[in-house]
Amino acid sequence: MESEARALNYYTHGSAAPTIQAMVEAETRRIYTPEKEATTVKERLRKLEKERSKARAKAAKISKAEKTSPSISVFAILGTLFVAVLMVFVVLAQINFNETAAEAVRLNMHRAELEERYRVLELAFESAVDIKEVERFARDELGMSRPDSEVIIIISSTPRDSAMVINSGESKGIQGFASFIKSLTEYFR
């Protein structure tokens, strides 16, 4: 718009002929006529109306597709089933754990009872064995007697044991080996 005003100013004050000025004015009127603007506005409205109707048709298609067939992913179904199976296994494992824990408690109580019974029986056994009663039974029933201090028992063994003391000085070389063999033969005789 500013460039047109400059051109108009140039043509009005400059050396250009009045016909050029008339041409510029006519062109300006032609470009900015209300009819032209009304036509472009109407065209825009038509375009917008077409786009709007296309968008409504698309929305109707989407809405119709959503209403007629809700689609669920196969992976969503499989995932849900997998989680459900896992939950069942967790519940079963918890039940098994609780049963095992109860059994462990019961067995620990039984073990404590058995340990107490063992202590009682051990005390009863220790009190039941009396040395004097054992001596009386051995003397009266079995005919045994205590050994006197004069009684000497000799135990004889058939092979005689012998030992040999080896020199504390170390023999070197063949002499040391020969003395080792000789001591072995004397030991096994």
Image (cartoon, rainbow, N blue to C red):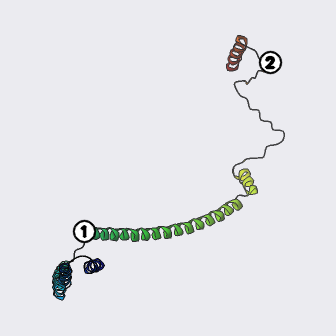
**Residue 50 in view (yes/no):** yes
Residue at (27, 67) in percent of width and height: 75
Answer above or below: position of 129 versus 157: below
Residue 113 vertical placement versus 149 (above, below): below
Judging depth in this view, the residue of 74 and 151 nearest the camera is 74
Q: Quadrant of residue 82?
A: bottom left
Asked if residue 140 lies left or right of residue 92, the reply is right
Residue indicated by mark 1: 74
| Location of residue 154 by image quarter | top right
Q: For the residue marked with disc 2, what is the amino acid? A: Gly
Image: 157 above or below 189? below
Q: Secondary structure at mark 1?
A: helix
Instruction: Please state, as top left, top right, bottom left or bottom right, where the N terminus lies in the image.
Output: bottom left
Q: Is residue 130 left or right of residue 106?
A: right
Instruction: Using the image as rendered, state which of residue 19 and residue 151 is in the foreground.
Output: 19
Name the residue rendered at 71%, 62% in the picture. Answer: 127
Q: Residue at x 17, y 84 (%)?
A: 36
The numbered disc on residue 176 is: none
Residue under label 2: 169
Q: Of the residues tagged 2 and 1, which is closer to the observer?
A: 1
Q: Is residue 149 left or right of residue 109?
A: right
Mark 2 surroundings: few (<14), some (14-19) or many (≥20) residues within 10 A: few
Report helix, strand or loop for mark 2.
loop
Q: Position of residue 86 (x, y in %)?
A: 36, 68
Residue at image coords 59%, 68%: 113
Question: Mark 2 or mark 1, which has the lower sequence index?
Answer: 1
